[in-house]
Amino acid sequence: MLTCDLITPSALTDRDIRTWRAMCALTPLFRSPLLSPDFTRAVAMGRDDVFVAVFRQQGQIIGFLPHHRRPHRFARPVGAPFSDYSALITFPDAQLDGRDALKAAGIDRFQAIGLIDPHNLFGDTGGEADMAYGIDLEGATDTLSRKHRKNVSRHRRNLIEAHGEIDFIVNDRNRDHFDRMLRLKREQLSQNGLHDFMSPPWAAALLERLFEASPDGLHGSLLTMTIGGKPALFHYGPRLGDRMHPWISAYDPAFGSFSPGSIFLMECQAPLKAAGVSYYDLSTGQSHYKNSFSNLSYPVRHVGIYGASPSGRLGRNLSLAAGRLQQAMGGRVSGAVTRLNRRFDQIACLELDLVGRAKGVAHAVSSIPRRLGAIDAG
C-alpha cells in the first residue's frame, strides 16, 4: 500500500538523505544539484512553503517529491523558476505511478519545469517538449563544426588583439565581481523588458546564501572570464561535487561585437575540468546555440501534471480543452499565448504576494513592445 508523509526539509533524517542521494547516484539524470536534498534545504531557508513528499510501500521509502505547496492543492518544483529541472526521485525499479503519488500527496496539479522522468512514472504527459544540454567534460568535447570553430577563433584573435589575453577564474570569490554580474544582468533584463528574477527577497537571499556557502557542499559558483585582466563575462549557479549548473549569464556589452558567449563556452572547458568539474549543465532553451557546444542532450517537458483524484482529473480535462482551443487559434497566435503564459507563470513563481504579482503583470504588459523589439533584434 502506498503511503505519503509530508515533511519539511529540516525534518529529513540522515537516513532519508542517504536514501535520496543513493537514488540520484543510481540514475545519472537525477544528479543535478537542483534535484539534491541540499538544494531543497537551501531554498527552504528562505521560504516556509517547501515540503517533501516521502512515499513508502510496506514501510520502505520508494520516492521523494520536493515541492512548494501553494493554495488549492497546487504545487511547484522547489526553487521555481530557478529549478530548471524537476523530478519524482526514485530508484530505477520503483513500482510507483506518478499520478497516484500526487494524489497521495494531496496534489491535484504539479506544474513541472523541465520534467525528468527516466523511469516513465508519469507516462504520456503532453505539455511542451524541450531539450536539456550539457558538457560532459570527461567525454569528447570538440563538438563545434569546422566552420563554427574557425569563426569563434577569429573573434577570439580579434578580441585579444583589441583588449588583451583571455583567462578564467573558477569559483571566483571576489565580491565585486559577484555584484558586477548582478548589475549587468539587471541592465540586460531591463533593456529586454523582462522580469527581474533576482529581486524578490527570497530569490536574492538564495543567490546570496549560496555565494557565501562553503565549497565543501552545495554552493554558488561564479565562473569569470577576464579580458586583459578585467572581468568581462560571468556564469553563476549552484555547484555540488563535480557538477555545476549556471543560472545567470552576464557580460559587459562593450565586448558584444566579439561574440564573447561563444568564446566563453569554447575556452572554459579546460579550466573547469582542472578545477574538478566533470559536467557543466547548460539547461534548456537557446537550442541553436547550446547544441553547438554540448556533447550531451536529453528530452524534458514543461507540463502541468494532474493527480489521480477526481478534482485532479477534472483539472486535466479542462486543461486539455484549453489546449485544443489554443491550437485552433493557429501557430502564430498559439505561440504568443504560450510565451505570455510562461511569462505570467514565472512571475507567479517569483512573487509570493498579490501586490508583487500585480506589479509584475503590469510590467510584463507595458514592456511587450520592448520585448518584441528585442526578439526582432535577435
Image (spheres, grey):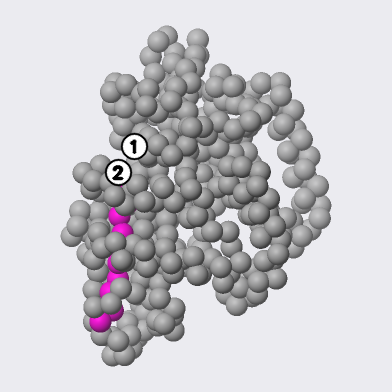
In the displayed structure, would residue 55 be above or below residue 137? above
Residue at the (59%, 50%) spot, across then down: 346
Residue at the (63%, 30%) spot, across then down: 71
> Within 10 angstroms of label 2, few (less than 14), some, or many (20 or more) residues?
many
- Of residue 300 and residue 83, the one placed in the foreground of this image is 83
- Of residue 217 and residue 127, the one placed in the foreground of this image is 217
The image quarter in which residue 230 lies: bottom left
In the displayed structure, would residue 354 be above or below residue 3? below
Q: Give residue 219's position: percent from left, percent from top.
A: 30, 47
Q: Give residue 93's position: percent from left, percent from top.
A: 40, 25
Where is mark 2, residue-wise?
218
Q: Secondary structure at mark 1?
A: helix
- Of residue 243 and residue 48, the one placed in the foreground of this image is 48
Q: Main secondary structure of the magenta part?
A: strand
Q: Is residue 351 found inside the magenta-colored segment of the image? A: no
What are the residue bounds of the magenta stretch? 219-228
On-image quarter of the C terminus: bottom right
In the displayed structure, would residue 117 be above or below residue 310? below
Taking the image as shown, residue 361 lies to the left or right of residue 29, namely: right
Q: Is residue 224 found inside the magenta-colored segment of the image? A: yes
Q: Secondary structure at mark 2?
A: loop
In the displayed structure, would residue 236 be above or below residue 91? below
Q: Are marks 1 and 2 in contact (CB under 8 Å)?
A: yes
Q: For the view shown, which residue lies furthest in the left direction? A: 274
Q: Give residue 109's position: percent from left, percent from top.
A: 63, 32
Tag 1: residue type? Asp
Residue at the (31%, 66%) spot, across then down: 177
Where is mark 1, residue-wise?
38
Taking the image as shown, residue 334 lies to the left or right of residue 44, namely: right
Tag 2: residue type? Leu
